[in-house]
Image (cartoon, helix red, strand yellow):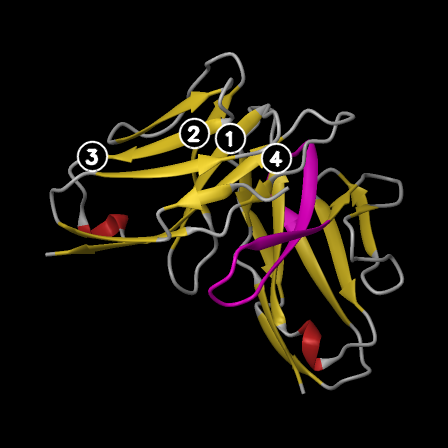
């Protein structure tokens, strides 16, 4: 199974600023994804991070707000841009390996004031 | 389309069994099950693929009815450590997409 780490684990940011979240996987994964989860709620897919090309975004999420990079098979970043209090949430990185199993990182708890 | 989970919550005594259901209005390629404890990341439990292949733990099993687009997770002889919120994630065969869409979750509480 893949082990996924994220940095930072939590942050408190002021509105209008940006935060970049890093995701590192300990082994190569075929797919990487970014999810958002409000406390007590389900997981909402933001985008699929594609290696060497633009991410594929879900309805309601745009590249200008959530730019994503994936320079190689084990690393990805998600930036939350021009933050507002509505962006306060837990952001989770996820990776799927060759066995089709999908794993999650510990999450980044973001609070925007 | 978000899959529908039932029940929304269940309370058990240690040693009792539970079944959690997940249904979709779309054809499914796979169903993934996760357990999430408060303040922690979701933990992978099991994957069920179209065609009947099943993976997962010994005391936790699952079924996948492709025709009905439903999956059920069976928790046998529940332990205190089973407490948490269970999510199903479904994957539909659309244009090569491999993304998972998650249900709203089932909160399971196991009491001594």
Cα distance in 3D space between marks 3 and 2 = 16 Å
Q: Which mark is residue B31?
A: 1
- The stretch in magenta equals A24-46
Cα distance in 3D space between marks 4 and 3 = 28 Å
Residue A91: x, y in percent?
A: 62, 61
Residue tagged 4: A96
- Do badges 4 and 3 share one subunit? no
Cα distance in 3D space between marks 3 and 1 = 20 Å
Asked if the residue under mark 1 is in contact with the one under mark 2, i.e. CB atoms within 8 Å, the reply is yes
Residue B30: x, y in percent?
A: 55, 26
Look at the image and say whether residue A34 sits in the magenta stretch: yes
From the viewer's perspective, is the residue at label 3 or at label 2 nearer? 2
Whichever of callouts 3 and 1 sits on the residue coming sooner in the sequence is: 1
Read off the chain for label 2.
B
Residue tagged 2: B71
Residue tagged 3: B76
Q: Which mark is residue A84?
A: none
């Amino acid at each position: 199974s893949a082990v996924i780490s994220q940095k930072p684990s939590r942050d408190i940011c002021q509105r209008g600023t940006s935060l970049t979240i890093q995701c590192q996987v300990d082994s190569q994964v075929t797919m990487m994804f970014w999810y958002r989860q409000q406390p007590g709620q389900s997981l909402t897919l933001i985008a699929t991070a594609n290696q060497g090309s633009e991410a594929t975004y879900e309805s309601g999420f745009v590249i200008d707000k959530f730019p994503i990079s994936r320079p190689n098979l084990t690393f990805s970043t998600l930036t939350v841009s021009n933050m507002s209090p509505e962006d306060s949430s837990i952001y989770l990185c996820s990776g799927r390996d060759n066995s089709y199993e999908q794993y999650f990182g510990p999450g980044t708890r973001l609070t925007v004031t | 389309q978000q899959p529908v989970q039932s029940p929304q919550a269940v309370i058990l005594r240690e040693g009792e069994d539970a079944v959690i259901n997940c249904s979709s209005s779309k054809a499914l390629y796979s169903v993934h099950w996760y357990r999430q404890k408060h303040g922690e990341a979701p933990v992978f439990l099991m994957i069920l693929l179209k065609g009947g292949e099943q993976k997962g733990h010994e005391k936790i099993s699952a079924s996948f009815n492709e025709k009905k687009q439903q999956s059920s997770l069976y928790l046998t002889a529940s332990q205190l450590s089973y407490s948490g919120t269970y999510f199903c994630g479904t994957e539909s065969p659309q244009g090569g997409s491999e993304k998972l869409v998650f249900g709203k979750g089932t909160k399971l509480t196991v009491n001594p």
